[in-house]
Image (spheres, rainbow, N blue to C red):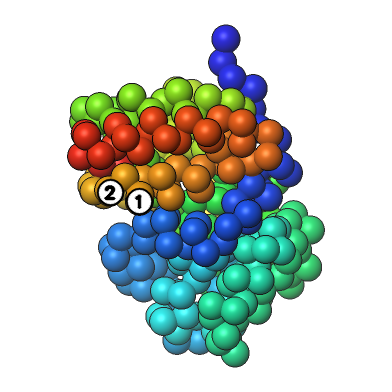
Amino acid sequence: MPPPRMAREAGRRAFGTDPANYHSARPDYPDWVYRTLRSRCALGPGAATFEIGAGTGKATCRLLEAGADPLVAVEPDPRLAGFLRTAHPDPALTVLVSAFEDAGLEDQAFDLGVSGTAFHWLEEETALAKIARLLRPGGWWAAFWNVFGDDSRPDPFHLATLDLLEGPSSPAAGERGLPFGLDTEARLAALQRTDAFDIVDTAMSAWSLVLDEDQIAALYATYSNISAPIARRCWPNCGASRATASAAGSSAT
């Protein structure tokens, strides 16, 4: 029997217990993501941009560096939003503490919309319809994910620690046996059903992240099925995870 699915509202507030740890433990997105946003998706000086589920600003800082202005970061968790404001006191940045569905954003006011490892927390069809309304003619939408684990490459540590992740599953797990962010067929089909986007494309790269036992424990503490209040009973097993990580020389992908 599959594990129960975590409610979207609960999941959106599962990451704010320790924003500083979330920010330091979660890996950055590869540089090619931002090169693509600049070369194909209008990111650059003066690009009016909104970001869905900005969190602590893992992508926000790179968007600001590229010249996004104004940049409206929509984040439903006030703890993460507070960290984001403090970490990035840039006049180009506005942080809205709101679910994206409720955010008061002006139609046809943006050149670019993005979401980094957050779009799975939304109802896809409804969110895409709103995104299409917010974009100016010729505007761009880009959703991207860091996905941990790679079925095409052996990862004994990842398999050995699956018991730690028991509990309500995140929508990131997807619906068809593929992680939401890797199910390109489903994501492209949803975009095409909106009939609002002229160019629909996808790209993917594999890369390795090598972590020591402290880093692995910090990263696992940011997973929603561990950090959400309903799942915290699983976290005392972390002691075994750390010992195994030390012996195995773990990696996450």
User: Is 202 left or right of 14, judged from the image as shown?
Assistant: left
Seen at 78% across and 68% down, the residue is 104
Which residue is at the front of the view, 97 or 219?
219
Residue 163 position by quadrant: top left
Count numbered badges in the picture: 2
Residue 192 lies, in percent from the top left, at: 53, 43
Q: Give residue 215's mark.
A: 1
Residue 116, compared with residue 172, is above or below; it is: below
Q: For the residues labelled 2 and 1, say whether their Cβ atoms are less than 8 Å apart.
A: yes
Q: Is residue 234 visible?
A: yes
Which residue is at the front of the view, 204 or 75?
75
Q: Give residue 211's mark.
A: 2
Residue 177, compared with residue 99, is above or below; it is: above
Residue 228, compared with residue 152, is above or below; it is: below
Category of crowding for the residue at label 2, using alpha-carbon neighbours closer than 10 angstroms: few (below 14), some (14–19), many (at least 20):
some
Residue 217 lies, in percent from the top left, at: 41, 44
* Secondary structure of the residue carrying numbered label 2: loop
Category of crowding for the residue at label 1, using alpha-carbon neighbours closer than 10 angstroms: few (below 14), some (14–19), many (at least 20):
some
User: Is 205 left or right of 121, judged from the image as shown?
Assistant: left
Q: Give residue 229's mark.
A: none
Seen at 32% across and 35% down, the residue is 243
Tell me which amino acid carries mark 2: Leu
Q: Is residue 135 visible?
A: no
Residue 30 position by quadrant: bottom left
Seen at 42% across and 55% down, the residue is 26
Taking the view exactly as shown, the residue that stands out farthest to the top is: 1
Seen at 50% across and 86% down, the residue is 46
Residue 188 lies, in percent from the top left, at: 47, 42
Residue 156 lies, in percent from the top left, at: 25, 27
Which residue is at the front of the view, 173 or 103?
173
Tell me which amino acid carries mark 1: Gln
